[in-house]
Amino acid sequence: MDMNNVKMRYGIVGQDEQLYKALDTAIQIAPTDLTVLIQGESGVGKEVLPRIIHDNSKRRNKRYIAINCGSIPEGTIDSELFGHEKGSFTGAIGEREGYFGAANGGTLFLDEVGELPMSTQARLLRVLETGEYIRVGSSEPRVTDVRIVAATNVNIPNAIREGRFREDLYYRLCTINIKMPPLRERGRDSVLLFKKFALDTAEKYNIPTPLRLTPEAEETITSYKWPGNVRQLKNVAEQMSILCTDRIVTPQVLAQYGVVANLSETTAVACTKQQSAHGTPPRDYENEIKMLASAVLELRHEVSELKSRLQHVSDHEEPSTALVPAQMHGTGLPIITQSLSPDIDMPAAHIPSPQPVKSVHTSLPPEEEDIQTAEEIVEHESLNLIEMEKRLIMKALQRHHFRRKNAADELGISERTLYRKIKDYGIED
Ligand SMILES: Nc1ncnc2c1ncn2[C@@H]1O[C@H](COP(=O)(O)OP(=O)(O)O)[C@@H](O)[C@H]1O
Ligand SMILES: [Mg+2]
């Protein structure tokens, strides 16, 4: 597979030389069985590389298993990776194969490998050197043929100095070393990425006018440091694509999302100080905004759907009993309760809870002809945002047959946050 194929197939955007070098190395070493260590800051796009490597290797028809070493509790990580025997510890009711057994013949991606506990590092080194591992509670070595691709955003040489990472394991892991560059070193790639994510979002939600960047805004995006790299940029572009009323993006608009030109260090420092002064944990806050943005957007669709139905009704001059979209029932969302137009009355059975909401006219005056912006809807119709979030979570869970991981992915939040919200809102599986 050549570079352009890979970029297309995996949706990779960018023309930076360092990025190309990383992709190129991945393509070249894919057919070998060499162990690979991918290094790069959080959010730079490391996770696509092990996939490229696996898909272009002779292992492609065997299993690819990705594990985030940082998210598995220390007490169970050995058993998850290497398996355990029945009764080997309290709670070990059955036996467990472990990922090293399950991925036999395939590829194992050990993400955040720098977070592995020291004892697990010893086991990992052994399997890398001999192809043998031992289940927890067993003394019998088992053989496996697994290709390891690992990734880390921590500086491993530092971790070695601080006694948190085995030096021998480091050298064993980085037979092939791939470095993913931070976004701030990729020049205009950030602008290309911004446009891609903004466009993707507009397409996904049927937003008619895509965002346009002024030349000054492009400069701001290029010079901004992007501490959260592509992940942060993606969040910002998605939020703006949904929330910006004005579809022309200027540096002033970007500043509202914390994206400021890096003209001097003082600007950056002042900005960081200002941000930390809010005292809100930035990650969670980001998640809330993202969820609300999606919720607002869904509502916007429903409102426009309602409008077009009303239009349809008025065109045919016959009041329908299906004026309120079915999905708005029983959601706790404010439903339009007033008479919808002078001659169309809502059937009483369709009004679950009376709440004051402005009336919708079947024929709008010219200045209101455009679909309202998300912000206007929120502002004017005093929506119950918590209900919206709850409903959004429910919908995502239903769509994914209550597979939390998939629902969390779709909602753009962590599984942990989703779990917390399910508990908080008392949503039953
Ligand atoms: N060059 C790129 N083109 C398109 N999307 C990208 C690119 N780099 C990263 N992404 C996206 O950015 C997000 C973060 O990337 P990820 O691989 O999870 O980062 P990390 O390095 O922290 O593992 C993902 O949604 C990923 O798809
Ligand atoms: Mg990652």
Image: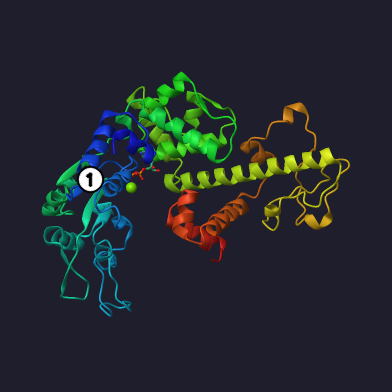
Residue furthest to the right in view is 343
Inspect the image, locate mark 1, and give the three-letter code of the amino acid beneath it: Ala
Task: Count neighbours of disc 1 (C-alpha within 10 A) and say few if under 14, some if 14 to 19, many if 20 or more.
Answer: many
Pick the quarter of the image with the N terminus.
top left
Which sits in the foreground, 281 or 10? Answer: 10
Q: Give x and y (percent) for residue 337.
A: 79, 49
Which sits in the foreground, 225 or 125? Answer: 125
Q: Quadrant of ligand 1?
A: top left
Q: Give x and y (percent) for residue 183.
A: 33, 33
Horizontal side of residue 91 vs 258, given as left or right: left
Q: Quadrant of residue 134?
A: bottom left
Q: Which residue is denoted by mark 1 in the rendering?
A: 30
Q: Give x and y (percent) for residue 158.
A: 17, 46
Q: Quadrant of residue 189?
A: top left
Asked whether residue 360 appears in the rendered view, the answer is no
Relative to 72, is 357 above or below?
above
